[in-house]
Image: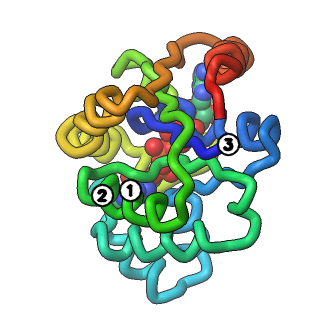
Amino acid sequence: MRLIIMGPPGAGKGTQAAGVADQYGIPAISTGDIFRANVSEGTALGVEAQRYMDAGEYVPDEITNAMVRDRLAAEDCKPGFLLDGYPRTLAQVEVLDGILADAGTPLDAVLVLTVDSEELVQRLLARAQVEGRADDTEEVIRRRQEVYSEQTAPLIAVYGERGVLVSVDGMGEVDEVSARISAALAGVTT
Ligand code: B4P
């Protein structure tokens, strides 16, 4: 199974990705997590990525694309993968299209989680108290929402036209959302 999970910041992508990846025996690949791991290890990539992330901006496409290209070439992606938070721009879609076409491995589905914008802010402010992420202040959260609307929301139409979009209501308890996702993916043929 080759999947993408999309949605605005705080929609529950990372939360839900773990369960979906387990269910299908595939790795969940979060570009946000890879960036954060690099930031905490103090790598050159981390130093570069941090200044964008802390401001709520996207890390430049060249950096993100190269990182994903490497990750998808790893052995554990042979049975499939779940991309969490990638692609986020039209340029990233093009690069991913090229990677998948070269490998002859098309996407099976693009899962989109929909959540009200006020609920998103509340979830991220709650996460700020637990995890203390630098990008979970109200000001940066609002900026991340704007960046998502400008650069990532248009991708939904792109994948919609390709007939691979699976939209799921992300409101409610984590388990309720998980159950909706399982039901929606059960209808996807690989
Ligand atoms: P991400 O790590 O992807 O950040 P996110 O969108 O905030 O995470 P996510 O949406 O997975 O969080 P979740 O809902 O699970 O990216 C961070 C930054 O990295 C970006 O801003 C950008 O700078 C950079 N980046 C990443 N990918 C990039 C790319 N492709 N190109 C360029 N830059 C990139 O969780 C949110 C909170 O809600 C959690 O606390 C969770 O517990 C809670 N929650 C989840 N589901 C819930 C529910 N049903 N009810 C209540 N709370 C819930």
Task: Point out which mark residue 97 bears.
Answer: 1
Disc 3, SS? loop
Q: Where is 34 relative to 161, above or below?
A: below
Q: Do the CB atoms of the residues marked 1 and 2 lie less than 8 Å apart?
A: yes
Residue extending furthest toward the front: 104
Residue drawn at point x = 42 percent, y = 81 percent: 47
Give the residue number, with chain letter if any, for mark 3. Answer: 1
Q: Nearer the N terminus, badge 1 or badge 3?
A: 3
Left or right for 20, reference 98: right
Q: Is residue 80 visible?
A: yes
User: Considering the image in quadrants, where does the C terminus appear?
Assistant: top right
Across and down, in percent, residue 117 comes to 34, 21
Q: Residues under labels 1 and 2: Cα distance?
A: 5 Å
Q: Do the CB atoms of the residues marked 2 and 3 lie less than 8 Å apart?
A: no
Q: Residues under labels 1 and 3: Cα distance?
A: 16 Å
Left or right for 41, reference 99: right
Across and down, in percent, residue 174 comes to 68, 21
Left or right for 56, reference 80: left
Give the residue number, with chain letter if any, for mark 2. Answer: 94
Q: Is residue 124 visible?
A: no
